[in-house]
Image (tube, rainbow, N blue to C red):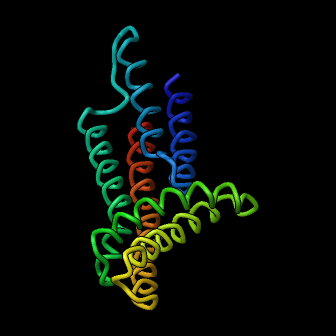
Amino acid sequence: MEIVAAVSVVLGCLLGVLLVALTLPGIWFMLLVAIGFQAWFALREPPMLMYEWWTLGACVLLGIIAEVVEVFASAVGAKKAGGTRRGAIGSVMGGILGAILGTVLLAFLPVLGTILGAALGAGAGALIAERHNGAKTWRQASTIGAGAAVGRLAATIAKVGFAVAVAAILCLGAFV
């Protein structure tokens, strides 16, 4: 039965990494699968643990860090390019909307549509927010938008890296 549980965790982790690439909460899905098996093992007779609790805690911490990186990276990209707080907020909102629209409108590019939509949305959100009050020229707003788009793309790549790390920890832990 332990092998079935471990293989199930591996499959859950593979799906979780794919979900993260689609900008969905895949790390939390992986953790939910692992914690579910942890609880199942703890309730068996005789009780045993699939993971040490610190292992699951470390994965939760990595998940929190990944979420923080994802949310603020486009804002940081906009700020580094000379954007204001308004542009940073626009990049975060645009990234969320862009990911949704990219998933729907670019459905023929399953994972890339979401990633491109999020990056382009972050850029457009920052550009629109900076141009809205007229304080920035089109050139300045475009530079800020590009910074936000690059930041969002970097965040997605970083979050996939975090997801792979969590998946590796959970998969190895399931077999040890």
State which quadrant residue 107 falls in. bottom right
Q: Is residue 104 left or right of residue 31?
A: right
Q: Residue at x 35, y 63 (%)?
A: 89
Q: Nearer the viewer, residue 63 or 9?
A: 63
Residue under the point 29% across and 54% down: 65
Give me the residue at 48% from left, 62% from top: 95
The image quarter in which residue 48 lies: top left
- Give the vertical position of 145 relative to 73 (above or below): below
Q: Nearer the viewer, residue 90 or 163?
A: 90
Q: Residue at x 28, y 75 (%)?
A: 84
Q: In the current view of this chain or complex, which residue is farthest to the right?
A: 108
Q: Is residue 133 left or right of residue 123?
A: left
Percent x, y of residue 11:
57, 40
Give whichever of 94, 26 is nearer the camera: 94
Q: Is residue 52 above or below residue 95?
A: above
Q: Can you name the residue that lies furthest to the front here?
A: 134
Q: Furthest-left residue in view?
A: 54
Q: Is residue 141 above or below residue 132?
A: below
User: In the image as oriented, which residue stretches furthest toward the top?
Assistant: 45
Location of residue 174 in the rendering, given as x and y in whole percent from the top left corner? 43, 36
Query: In what quadrant of the picture does the C terminus appear?
Result: top left
Residue 42 x, y percent position in the rendering? 35, 17
